[in-house]
Image (tube, rainbow, N blue to C red):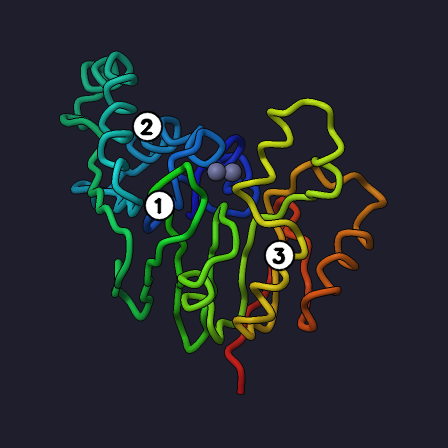
Amino acid sequence: MVDCGRGVLQRATAAGVGAAGLSALLLTHLHSDHIAELGDLLITRWVTDFAPDPTPLPIIGPPGTTEVVQAMLKAFGHDISYRIAHHADLTAPPPIDVHEYTEGQAWDRDGVTIRVAPTDHRPVAPTIGFRVEAAGAAVVLAGDTVPCATLDQLAAGADALVHTAIRKDILSRVPQQRIKDVCDYHSSVQEAAATAQRAGVSTLILTHYVPPLAPGQEEQWRALAATEFSGQIALGDDLLRVQVRPRQ
Ligand SMILES: [Zn+2]
Ligand SMILES: [Zn+2]
């Protein structure tokens, strides 16, 4: 699972994955919309994993992740103590295994590798993107970022790039400065598309739409991306499934 914002456990359930079925949690950064459901995820995985000796949940994130995870466990300290008191087979807090990275190889297990590189979402720092490779295919998860050379390198030649995208043409006309501020540390649809083009990826999957994509505006979003990117464009609505195949 990559990031765990609002609603992520319900969506995972709808996609057929329970909290106990997650092999790892990857965090691109520590903004609330990317970690809002971390506490629920940790507790739900803990109480629904019935293995006699549950594997700690690997959590891979930028520096600061350990602190956030520990604070989350502390916030749920009462809950954790109630459950330990109530269930004879729960004897310890949720098992977790946090690893902090800003770059380099973060995972090599069961034929899956994950590489990390810095992104640019300043003043939020450090932030990271992930390149997941398995069965000859590569998918890059950019997270929130403006275009940057390290993301270009991470995404080079990938089969799919999942990129957050905002409509700067809309947000820049909103009167509130706090909304306008959103523009300066995210990529517009066109900037995300240009990153995909430079990297030579096959499929661009737009996600984390700001403002939310209004029904009927799908073609407008696609058309903006197509001004910069000549590959396949997918609008990453919740529960969208994209089949990624390695290039021949
Ligand atoms: Zn963010
Ligand atoms: Zn965000």
Pick the residue in front: 24 or 186. 186
User: Residue at horizontal 68%, vertical 22%?
Assistant: 176
Mark 1: few/some/many CA within 10 Å (<14, 14-19, 20+): some
User: Residue at horizontal 28%, vertical 57%?
Assistant: 103
**Which residue does the numbered mark 3 point to in the structure image?**
191
Q: Quadrant of residue 234?
A: bottom right
Which tag is nearer the camera, tag 3 or tag 2?
3
Q: CA distance from mark 1 to mark 2?
A: 14 Å
Which three-letter amino acid code belongs to the residue tagged 3?
Glu
Q: Does residue 104 appear left or right of residue 122 in this picture?
A: left
Of the numbered discs in the image, which one, if any, rests on residue 11?
none
**Which residue does the numbered mark 2 point to in the structure image?**
43
- Residue lying at the far left of the rendered structure: 91
Q: Quadrant of residue 238?
A: top right
Q: Quadrant of residue 112?
A: bottom left
Circle 1 SS class: strand
Which three-letter amino acid code belongs to the residue tagged 1?
Leu
Q: Are marks 1 and 3 in contact (CB under 8 Å)?
A: no
Pick the residue in front: 134 or 222. 222
Q: Where is residue 78 shown, x and y percent of the image?
A: 25, 12
First in sequence: mark 1 vs mark 3: 1
Circle 3 SS class: helix
